[in-house]
Image (spheres, grey):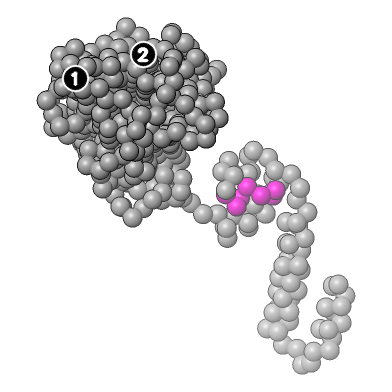
Amino acid sequence: FGSSLGSLDKQIVPRTIASANFDNMSRAWMAQLLLMPLFVISQETCSSVTCSNNPGDPGNARLGNDTTALLHFQVASTTTTTLPACVAEINTGDCNAMNACRCSPDINPQPIGDFPDTQGTLQCGGKNSCQKQAASNTNFFKMNTPSPLECSGQDSCQKNFNVENIGSMCVTGDNAVGPSSQAGTYKLADPDVATGRVNDVCCAREVGQNQPTCKSPTFENVGSFFCTGDVSCDNVQATLSGDFYCRSLQGCGDQINPADDEEYWRWTTSGKHCIRCQSTDPGLDQGSCQQADFQFPLDNSYPNLYCSGFKACQDARLTLTGSGTCANINCTLDGVNKNADLPCKGLEVDLQGGAKCFAGGDAISATNHPTPPGNNNQNEVCTLDAPCQNAEQTCKPSFCCVSDADVGADNPTIDCAGGCTGTTSTTSTTSTTSTT
């Protein structure tokens, strides 16, 4: 190749000193330029020393140990990304200061975790904490590892603060997870049988709070759901596989509109399930599950709907679908108002595909005001003479956020410590422990 260049030199006349020097430089540059791509392509190995640890870094190519070739490649192609400060703050798990962790995900989903400062829990304890700023942003934060999410700060977890792969969730903050126009979507991870972690959700309005918790959000893939406190869980959309417990002055339904698909509790597994709607002090316009919509779309589902106290299941709707499905409905007076509390008045039962039901309880057999559940015309539809054999005869569920000693108590203690490990619902087929 060099001799060819030399022969070309002899044909160039006249030659000057400047042109001769230029030719020498040109030959050297051309040779270097032609050899460099061949050298880079020939590399076949990658060591931990010369390759980036970032799988998305272009420098993580198979460039070998030659620093010249690596530099030549990286100068033109390596980019640097900086984690947004708010996401870095969320990753610590400590969002307990006022206005902490307020941002929108840049990508969908935005990875977060593993919350080392709070022992693996995302704690949104500060007022106005964990709020997404751009209402038009529908992206999700996604936990790297299923971890508990606690929304205990006033107005926390609002403005469509969407999170997925949640281990369990406990909401106790005044006006947390809501209000209607700003409620987010929360997707729970599957339970972990090996560790005992369950994917339960608890919403509790504590004494002295001015606003309800969990107003109009969407929950997906929940194990069991627990609601307590005035107007907790109003107008919720939820899919769940375990049990449901609502102990509230009013809430767990739609306080404005009749039962419809705008709000629902929909079960995604068959087998035994407990629904306990227990009203507390009478006198308000609403009962605990008034105008709620309970849906069992699968064959061989065996729910036990327990309605106790003032308007507990008034004007609610229970849809039973499929072969083998059979429900027990227990309408019980609270012992105070007797015939005046009407726990199942207007309760609509929709039987589809051969489903059946049994209705009992002292509210149905009351002398003065019998209120048996019926269809949408309130014609009696639960014609079985005895309770369904496969369904639970009693209904006393437990949840990760309620200690075993407080199950069924008038004012159970809410505690999300430990990330809902070791305890679970009592009656559902997805449970890992059973106490009934």
What residue appears at the point 72 percent right and 87 percent down from the top-left corner? 16
What residue appears at the point 83 percent right and 78 percent down from the top-left corner? 5
Mark in the foreground, 2 or 1: 1
Local SS, label 1: loop
Q: Amino acid at mark 1?
A: Asn
Q: Amino acid at mark 2?
A: Lys
Q: Which disc is residue 432 wearing? A: none
Image quadrant where one finds the C terminus: top left
Which residue does the numbered mark 1 point to in the structure image?
368
Q: Is residue 413 above or below residue 54?
A: above
Upstream in the sequence, badge 2 or badge 1? 1
**Which contiguous range is marked in magenta?**
57-63
Packing grade of label 2 (10 A; few <14, some 14-19, many >=20) is some
In this rendering, would 382 be left or right of 2? left
Q: Is residue 115 magenta?
A: no
Image quadrant where residue 162 sits: top left
Image quadrant where residue 235 sits: top left
- Mark 2 vs mark 1, CA separation in Å: 29 Å
Q: Which disc is residue 396 wearing? A: 2
